[in-house]
Amino acid sequence: MDANLKKSIAAFSSVVWSGLLTLMKLVVGLMTGSLGILSEALHSALDLVAAGGTLFAVKVAAQPADDEHPYGHGRVENLMALGEALLLLGTAAWVMIEAAQRLLSDNPDTALHVELSIWAFAVVIMSIVVDVNRARMLYRVARETKSAALEADAAHFASDIWSSLAVLTGLCCVALAPMTEPGSWQHWLLMRADVFASVVVALFILHICWELGREAVANLMDKADTQAADNIRRLMKENMPAYPVHRIRVREVGNKPYVEMVVLVPRELHVDTAHDITEAIEALVERHLPQAETILHVEPSESLPDTPEFIIRRIALTHRFGVHGLVLMRAEEGFLIFADLELPKDAEMDSWQVAIQAFRSEVKRHLQADAVVVHVEPQIRELPRFSRPLPPQDVWQQTVRRAMIELGAPLPSDISTFNKGEKHFCIVTIPPEPSLTVEQSHTRLTQLTKRLSATLPDTARFIVTYHGCR
């Protein structure tokens, strides 16, 4: 069921029950003269107003964002929660004033008189049963839809349970008063139990008023969700440690989280690569906070390592080169640097000469090298052709798996083969080995690839890689 429909149904049911309880409590309160029941009736009347406001709020909050409200209309739920807190404050004030007047009355027998009947007990017990079920239902829907207005209603009705129990206790005490001796302290206390119960109701109302008001004001003032921010920082450290989080802010508007982040990246990063990185970070955030809207800013880092290898790769990045096979050597003849540059395979060398020379000059100047020697390789290598056709897929996978076992390699978690005519490309994925360093992992995978190719010659081009790297 749609979240907005769930909220509307929950709010509407709350309105119906608030109306019924208000009517019953008011009738019974006037019949009996019980201040406790009358305070409960007034409380329920305000519940009815608040529940109607909640129903209105969830309908407004469900409206999509527009030009005037680009963050949506979710704040109306916080406004309604604040309004409900103010209504509760007025209720508590009235009850406290009425209780004081009855306790200080010159004619206590009239002021404290309560006409007991079975209806007084029945309406309070029914109110408790309704509020228990209503609070559970509203809490459940509020958690599922992250609705501030429904959560306010749920907290409100949960407090009503305790206040109703206080009123029920007061009625029981008043019923016991005739059994005590007039003028005794027991009689004095039991006769005033109904008024004391109304004071307890007022205190419960003041408590929930404070909680609702504080939460509503905090949300309206864009209180940050520090726990969500810390969780995202942790996820970034675990999954994307190369891009540290510089700043992060998380807030919620209605039930939609908004995340603003600044991450540090190499200053020479190309815009296409930066875009890919931001999309990966946004996907990571959304897995943790579903439906989150992330605004991400990448900032050039001043604290990234300045090792010679890193500087060379940064310079290559500015010229759109891939670079590998770096060798840095301090010989008697001076400081020498060797690098393999990866260029588009169909590019004409004349069109890249200026960029290659600029790369050499920058590396030489930054590292004060005596010589920079580059070797050019095609960026995309052609797959070799194999005249022997591969067997059916299941037989081929069994053959590759058997060969890996004979080599003493980890059992492959996946074997994927791609064919185009006489070109066969086989990717063998093995479980990760986190205890190995990058150098050890490279050596390990290279050896396995070479040994597998030697075990199954003239069949396919093999690549052995770790799970999570393809």
Image (cartoon, helix red, strand yellow):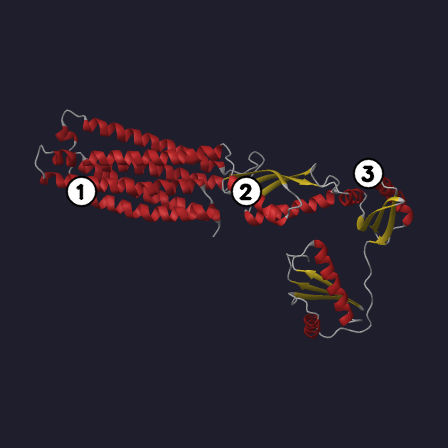
The residue wearing badge 2 is: 230
The x, y position of residue 173, in whole percent, is: 17, 40
Which residue is painted at 66% across and 66% down in the image?
412
Which residue is painted at 40% across and 37% down in the image?
53
The kind of secondary structure element at disc 3 is helix
The x, y position of residue 179, in whole percent, is: 9, 41
Q: Nearer the viewer, residue 222 or 6?
A: 222
Q: Nearer the viewer, residue 386 or 257?
A: 386
The kind of secondary structure element at disc 2 is helix
The residue wearing badge 3 is: 366
Marks 1/2: CA–CA distance = 52 Å
First-in-chain label (2 vs 3): 2
- Front of the two marks 2 and 3: 3
CB contact under 8 Å: marks 2 and 3: no
Marks 2/3: CA–CA distance = 38 Å
Does the image show residue 421?
Answer: no
Where 28 falls versus 239 (above or below)?
A: above
What is the quadrant of residue 110 in the picture? top left
Q: Nearer the viewer, residue 137 or 252?
A: 252
What is the quadrant of residue 40 in the picture? top left
Where 431 falls versus 45 (above or below)?
A: below
Q: Position of 195 compared to 302: left or right?
A: left
The x, y position of residue 226, in whole percent, is: 52, 39
CB contact under 8 Å: marks 1 and 2: no
Which residue is painted at 92% across and 47% down in the image?
350
Q: Mark 2 belongs to which amino acid? A: Asp
- Front of the two marks 1 and 3: 3
- Residue, far front: 332
Q: Position of 173 compared to 247: left or right?
A: left
The residue wearing badge 1 is: 172
